Image (cartoon, rainbow, N blue to C red):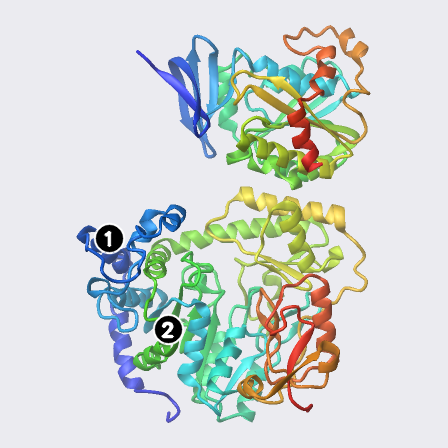
Amino acid sequence: MELWFSENHTETVKFSIKVDKQLVSVQSEFQRIDIFESEEFGRFLTLDGYMMLTEKDEFIYHEMITHVPMAVHPHVRKVLVIGAGDGGVIRELTRYKEVEHIDFVEIDELVVKVCREYLPQTACCFDDPRVHAYYEDGLKFVRKHEDEYDLIIVDSTDPFGPGEGLFTKEFYGNCYKALKADGIMVNQHESPFYAADARAMKRAHKRIVESFAISRVYQAHIPTYPSGHWLFGFASKKYHPVHDLNAAGWNALNLKTGYYNTNLHKGAFYLPNYVQEMLHDVE
Amino acid sequence: MSKFIGDAALAESAAGNSRKNDDLSQQTTAPILEALEEFKQMRLVPFDVPGHKRGKGNKELTDFLGERCLTVDVNSMKQLDNLCHPVSCIKAGEELAATAFGAAHAFFMVNGTTSAVQAMVLSVCKKGDKIILPRNVHRSVINALVLCGATPIYINPQTNERLGIALGMKLSEVEAAIRENPEAVAVLVNNPTYYGICSNLKAITELAHRHNMFTLVDEAHGTHFYFGKNLPISAMAAGADFAAASMHKSGGSLTQSSFLLCGTRVNAKHVRQVINLTQTTSGSYLLLSSLDISRRNLALHGEKIFQQVEALVEYARVEINQIGDYYAYSQELINGDSVYDFDITKLSINTLDVGLAGIEVYDLLRDEYDIQIEFGDIGNILAYVSVGDNYKNIERLIGALSEIRRLYKRDRAGMLRHEYITPKVVTTPQEGFYGEKESLTLEESIGHICAEFVMCYPPGIPILAPGEAITEEIIEYIKYAKDKGCSMTGPEDMEINRLNVLRGGY
């Protein structure tokens, strides 16, 4: 039997994974949610047919979106996580003892339910007493908070569909308002490689630059995302992502990671020329 | 009854027929849509216009609009009826529309609600006739007066000081105007206004009828009144004689498509002749089918649709009022007269306490937040919310408004508040428009009679109309609106640095 999951990375480029079986397929109020089992990547989650994560490479994404700001900010006590229904960001955050409170805002509760059942590798830590879940629109939630968070992590889907509002200037502006005077916002920043993704990436960067004093972009290699070359945004009111890196402090925590380390942290902010040019265009 | 045009008795009998089967089940058909579907099956060889021949002759256009669209962009023919003289599917569509709207007759209009407004004015007014109307009408009304030569008797709308918006007509003011002008042929009511303000339509209609005058309603922003629950009374329900209902606004049909609705006292055959004076003989079937489909949709699902819109707008209003400084107003404005009722599906927001003109918020929303709203004037913005909206987009609007306040709020000192300036009508719009003119700078034009329109678009309500005196106050207002970035239209001089005025002062 030949059963394949395919996702078009562009109109003329297709990425496929051979599927052993489909574990679940449900339609929520917002999107279609599927989880498949595969030999190469283990279980993987797709939303409306777009790859969200696989068991094999999710560690790269979740470590890079979490540990980079955590190694810069000297005292993260209160965190807001938007999106991230798979639980991967929550899992990484709950490893830090200094984090006292995590507000977790996901628009689609069904994603969390499905992941709890089929993806325990990431959806393992929702029951941590520090986690407070809110199932509502991220834009609405953040609008009502001011000077409250040390860190906001925006683990959004793509800038179309339910995640669209999380790529807007009003959202970034409201995040700025919700952060404390030395707060940091990190976001999923799309890819520079294919034209459509690059447009979304530049647009997001432009909107963040307009809202934050410091706005830098860093990269990681995520095999199952279009082109594999993926970016994250680091927006901050005070701390510089490289100059203010507390490598010794982070290493003293002795967190075991598969991708992130404090040398790679610095390297991740050194971008290829073509990406630098794209960012420069909109700064 | 001598001033009524045509044979009213004839019209009444026609109305009786069309109202007999006021039954929802008959609204499930869409005769124009069905005729077009059937027409497609016939696979006729087209040796008629349009020359793109079902799109085959214009690949670029077909690629852009889609083949399905081009195959029904066809001309009048036997099986598709003729808009100028409907006998089959268009006639059936108009009858269904009339039933759906509770009208004696409905006309499909393909040149915007502007054409519906002009047709109703031209149906009752001719040169020398007087028509009573509020000054804050859409330009299409005064355009019609330019065409027919009637004299406007303006009723000054009441103004809400705090909001700087014109309200509805007071019954007592209409009464006074009728008393002073008993020979007037009609009263025109703007209902609701762009902002959602309604006049006492039923009482005004009864008053006009008691004095043998027609009631004409510019209902461009009130199509949903016919279908939603808990909404202000519609023109036809109030007994009005004409209503221009902009189906393409809240009704969901294609831009430029509209309905002209007539009551029982109107001779529809005469109205058809008036419409045909200026109407295209190549009525677009894209527009006609969109009217037909949208009418069916509203008749069957309108109540639910507008319930959803009401809920969305009410949610937005509560959230926006919580941001602070913005004032999203609603039924609390109702005062039993100049605000007899309020259309709660309108999301009108006063911005003056943020220290920003409405037009400035409008520009910020578009330029900085990629949000296009309907219009911004000196003190207000209007976000048009419809069946096509959802909470996600509403959240973006609320979020952006909250951000604009955080980033741009300033002291409101120096904010101009007044939207309404009482016009001085010196001569009729027709004489003002066609008289011998000269071009003067804005400053020089003070004290002269204007020969053209000046307005902000949207909303398209004239600041100056042909035949009106140009005062210092008006020129100051024009300069302020230009300075705030309002899109000014009307004059020959696109930059609005000069105005055409009648030769000689006044």
Q: Is residue A82 left or right of residue B23?
A: right
The amino acid pointed to by label 2 is Gln
Instruction: Where is residue B64? Give x, y as percent.
Output: 41, 47
State the SS at label 1. Answer: helix
Check the image and report above or below for B435 versus B32: below
| Residue corresponding to mark 1 | B37
Instruction: Where is residue B61? Give x, y as percent.
Output: 39, 51
**In the picture, residue A87 is in which quadrant?**
top right
Outermost residue, front side: B57
Instruction: Pick the residue in front: B470 or B298.
Output: B470
| Residue corresponding to mark 2 | B279
**In the picture, residue B72 is in which quadrant?**
bottom left
Instruction: Where is residue B228? Give x, y as percent.
Output: 43, 59
State the SS at label 2. Answer: loop
Residue at point 76%, 8% (across, down): A251
Residue at point 59%, 48% (across, down): B371
